[in-house]
């Protein structure tokens, strides 16, 4: 059983499928990947994972989602005991400087604009995963 967990939070099924394919390519199945299609679902999954002592090592969070956007999800994660230390990488199509500034102001660990080319997207996810799940050493709360 692997010990790396990643949560993808994205409402676009095509983007989720691309991310799952890319992560499978770069991790060779060595990461347990969960998906939430809304902010509410993400918080539910995170609270359950916290209660089971199985928090993700990384959250890939889309910015532009209906009902509860990525900033609201990020605020909730940063405000909740036991979730606040999880690295959250904003993975979004927006390259607008305002979105980047606001994401960092709300506690994003990193901000990555989704490359349109699949090869570049796969390489971006490989780099993100390698850094946040292998090289980075965050404080553990569980």
Image (tube, rainbow, N blue to C red):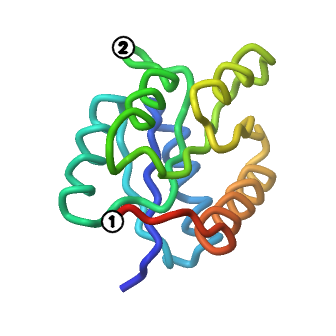
- Residue underneath mark 2: 67
Residue at (47% x, 35% y) in the render: 10
Height in image: 141 above or below 112? below
Q: Considering depth in this image, is 42 or 27 the residue closer to the camera? A: 42
Count how many numbered circles sit on residues in the image.
Answer: 2
Q: Is residue 120 left or right of residue 43?
A: right
Percent of width and height locating residue 134: 63, 74
* Callouts 1 and 2 close, C-beta under 8 Å: no
Callout 2 crowding tier (Cα within 10 Å): few <14, some 14–19, many ≥20: few
* Circle 1 residues within 10 Å: few <14, some 14–19, many ≥20: few
Side of 99 relative to 13 (left or right): right
Task: Pinpoint residue 19: horizontal percent, then vertical percent.
Answer: 57, 51
The structure residue drawn at horizontal position 44% and vertical position 21%, both measured from the top left corner, is 72
Q: Nearer the viewer, residue 57 or 29?
A: 57
Image quadrant occupied by the N terminus: bottom left
Q: Dot 2 lies on which element?
A: loop
Q: Secondary structure at mark 1?
A: loop
In this orientation, which residue lies closer to the viewer: 74 or 115?
74
Q: Is residue 50 above or below residue 110?
A: below
Real-space Cα separation, disc 1 to disc 2, in angstroms: 30 Å
Q: Which mark is residue 142?
A: 1
Closer to the chain start, of discs 1 and 2, is 2
Residue drawn at x 62%, y 59% as measured from the top left? 22
């Amino acid at each position: 059983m692997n010990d790396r967990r990643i949560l993808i939070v994205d409402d676009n099924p095509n983007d989720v499928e691309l991310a799952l394919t890319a992560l499978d390519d770069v991790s060779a199945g060595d990461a347990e990947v969960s998906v939430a299609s809304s902010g509410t679902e993400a918080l539910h999954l995170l609270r359950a994972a916290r209660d089971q002592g199985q928090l993700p090592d990384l959250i890939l969070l889309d910015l532009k989602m209906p009902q509860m956007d990525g900033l609201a999800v990020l605020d909730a994660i940063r405000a909740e005991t036991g979730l606040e230390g999880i690295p959250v990488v904003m993975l979004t199509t927006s390259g607008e400087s305002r979105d980047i500034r606001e994401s960092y102001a709300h506690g994003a660990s990193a901000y990555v604009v989704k490359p349109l080319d699949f090869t570049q997207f796969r390489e971006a996810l490989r780099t993100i995963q390698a850094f946040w799940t292998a090289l980075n050493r965050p404080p553990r709360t569980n």
